[in-house]
Image: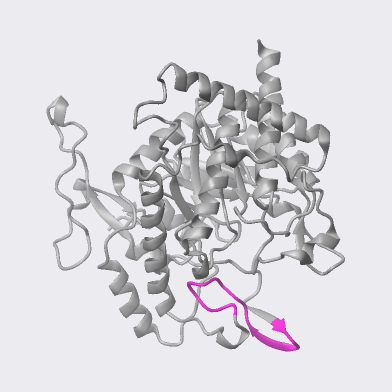
Amino acid sequence: MADNAWTPDSWRSKPIKQDVVYDDPKELEAVVGRVANLPPLVSSPEIDRLRAQLKDVAEGRAFLLQGGDCAESFDYCNPTAIEDKLKVLLQMSLVLLWGMRLPIVRIARMAGQYAKPRSSPYETVNGETIMSYRGDNVNSIDPACRRPDPQRLLQAYFHSASTVNFVRLLLDSGFADIHQPEAWDLGHVRNPEIRREYQSIVNRLTDSLEFMSVIGATSSQASALNTVDLYTSHEALLLEYEQALTRAVPKPLPGAEPALAGRKRPYEPSTPPRKALAPELCDWYNLSAHFIWIGDRTRQLDGAHVEYFRGVKNPVGVKVGPTMDPAELVRALDILDPDFESGRVTLITRYGAAKIADFLPAHVRAVQETRHRPVWCCDPCHGNTTTAPTGHKTRSFDAIISEITSSISIHRELGSRLSGVHLELTGEHVTECTGGSQELSHSDLPNNYQTFCDPRLNYEQSLDIAFKIAKVYESEREENN
């Protein structure tokens, strides 16, 4: 086998970061074998559709909205939590669509975001050193249950499957229909001027929808106002699990008639007991999610995660922060996108509002000197985490907005374009980040601080973000006209 040949398990020959060590390797092997024989969670045609949409994003014909919890809990697999998260993502996408006049590609950090990278394998709780919480698919938030348990991988699969199933049910049942006046209650906005500004946008949206209804433009069940594409994503951290859900999918038949050109051969998974396809006849898809990304702690060029990611057909993301050298960024793109496919890689930048001007320009210029056409996406949350006087980990809404607007400006000045945002958010009315139209302060944080991981934008703050971005792009559009 050639040194650069890829297989779903070739990552095992590389050094790995953030690995989980289990007490019983045989139990892990048995669990992973069980997952490998379970049905996929998403389909390859759905992934191909997302690839096509991200190509549009990379080439300026659409915008990416990606959001969800820092780390999902198994407890979040309930109808209310899922509905709330979908509602805020759908409402945000409508506001962005209005402001940008571009299709919005929606990806949820959902149905698999159960793992959490940590800076240290241990932490101190009540004076005792114990194993760090690594996410619900590894161990428990309960300090007494921190031993990594392979059975949690199986639980993660079934919780993901239930979440995906319910999301499909909601979307097929008209949940995405935005003709709901109660969806636009702006009573949370304390500042009268901001409330008038938001209400003006909502009024214009409502007028547009009523006009379309009058002329019959919304009567079709297939209308984009009634149903949407919504894709799932997670950080692919635990490679044993990801490998188990990596499946061989036959390539389109060569020389097929035009009418059959998009058809695939009958599905033949690469897992036992069926015979594996010859490598030249198949593509490999990670069917645990539509979109997966590499975190800032696992993007080593010679590491296991980059090795795994380079071989799957899914569109992939890479977190890019202050520690990444521009030359390293280019090399990562060369490895992950050797065919120069527009939108194949999404660069998720995370610097912090105070550092973005120091690092983003060099990264943009380095990529501009290549043939790569990635999606540039701003993660304004991770680099703006602080500790409040109350002891709570928090984020400032103003710092988040500052990083987004700085990213838009820097890209524009360099002849590039910010094509997406990646947000840690929830549809619930939590008090974890300060600021926004509710004007939350540090003293408000204990009121409903629910996160067991990083602080999330709440429902109201998430809508605030959408309104702010929409206004920026509306102003840009008016200037161009």
Front residue of 405 and 217: 217
Q: Is residue 161 left or right of residue 258?
A: right
Report the quarter where the N terminus lies.
bottom left
Residue at horizontal 49%, vertical 67%? 15
Residue at horizontal 40%, vertical 41%? 174
**Magenta includes 127?**
yes
Residue at horizontal 67%, vertical 13%? 480
Report the span colored magenta: 124-141
Residue 442, position as x, y percentages in the image = 84, 59
Report the quarter where the C terminus lies.
top right
Front residue of 354 and 260: 260
Residue 46, position as x, y percentages in the image = 34, 43
Q: Would you say the magenta stretch is mainly helix, strand or loop?
A: loop
Residue at horizontal 22%, vertical 43%? 251
In the depicted structure, whether residue 212 falls above or below residue 295: above
Front residue of 135 and 163: 163
Using the rendered image of the protein, determine whether residue 311 is visible from the camera's viewpoint: no
